[in-house]
Amino acid sequence: MSGYSFELITGPMSCGKTEELLRRIRRCIIAKKKVKVISPDVDTRAKGDYIESRNGLWLDAVKVKYSVQILSIVKDAEVVAIDELQFFDSNIVKVITELMNQGKKVIGTGLELDFKAEPFGSMPELMCIATKVDKLHAVCMKCGCEHATRTQRLIDGKPADKNSPLIMIGGDETYEARCIKCYELPDVEAKKKKMGFRLLQFSKD
């Protein structure tokens, strides 16, 4: 468990990212490492200063608004765990690079794709600088397959339009994991229907 590393855990909602982060943190604690846990203050799912997995596991965490604040908070830490990396500002890439340069071990989680299935925040850059990337899959809440890689946003039980706000913190009632086949973008589907969308058919002539 030496420093100079950045382990990144990614995947859709409900795939177990925070649960895996907590498991790795506890291993570091057993190894008597000095650990500091960081969480963005935009994530309001946890009611207090801690991170919590969907199965009820939790650990104390420091909520941070700006990524540069992390540097002063973790000065004495050997291991820095950061949850929900997609919510931090773009300086998070430089911050994590600096933490690695200081010899610290960094473990983070984040959604690599937003509800529109587009790269989320600084996650593309973070995946590039990570020394290890683990992409987790979830169970598709529509068909039940075990290869869900997308996060479907639901509003009143229906897939949200791609023009709705990027950040809307929720839980099982507002988001669910979907496989590529079951994932929907309503505005695209509506446009196809309105235009009488159909596959091009080529004449044999």
Image: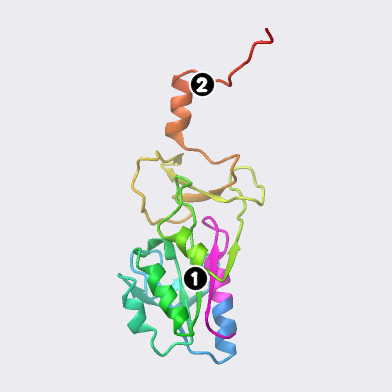
Q: Is residue 99 magenta?
A: no
Q: Nearer the viewer, residue 83 or 58?
A: 83
Q: Is residue 10 magenta?
A: yes
Query: Would you say 142 lies left or right of 175 here?
Result: right
Q: Residue at x 37, y 74 (%)?
A: 48
Secondary structure of the residue carrying numbered label 2: loop
Residue 157 horizontal/vertical position (percent): 45, 41
Vertical order, 163 against 65 (above or below): above
Give the magenta-colored segment's residue range.
Answer: 1-23
Q: Earlier in the sequence, mark 2 or mark 1?
A: 1
Secondary structure of the residue carrying numbered label 1: strand
Residue 152 horizontal/vertical position (percent): 49, 46
- The residue beneath circle 2 is 197
Residue 108 got which mark? 1
The local crowd at label 2, few if under 14, some if 14 to 19, many if 20 or more residues have their Cα within 10 Å, is few
Question: Which amino acid, mark 1?
Answer: Gly
Q: Residue at x 45, y 40 (%)?
A: 159
Residue 24 got which mark? none
Residue 203 picture quarter: top right
Residue farthest toward the bottom in the current orientation of the protein: 32
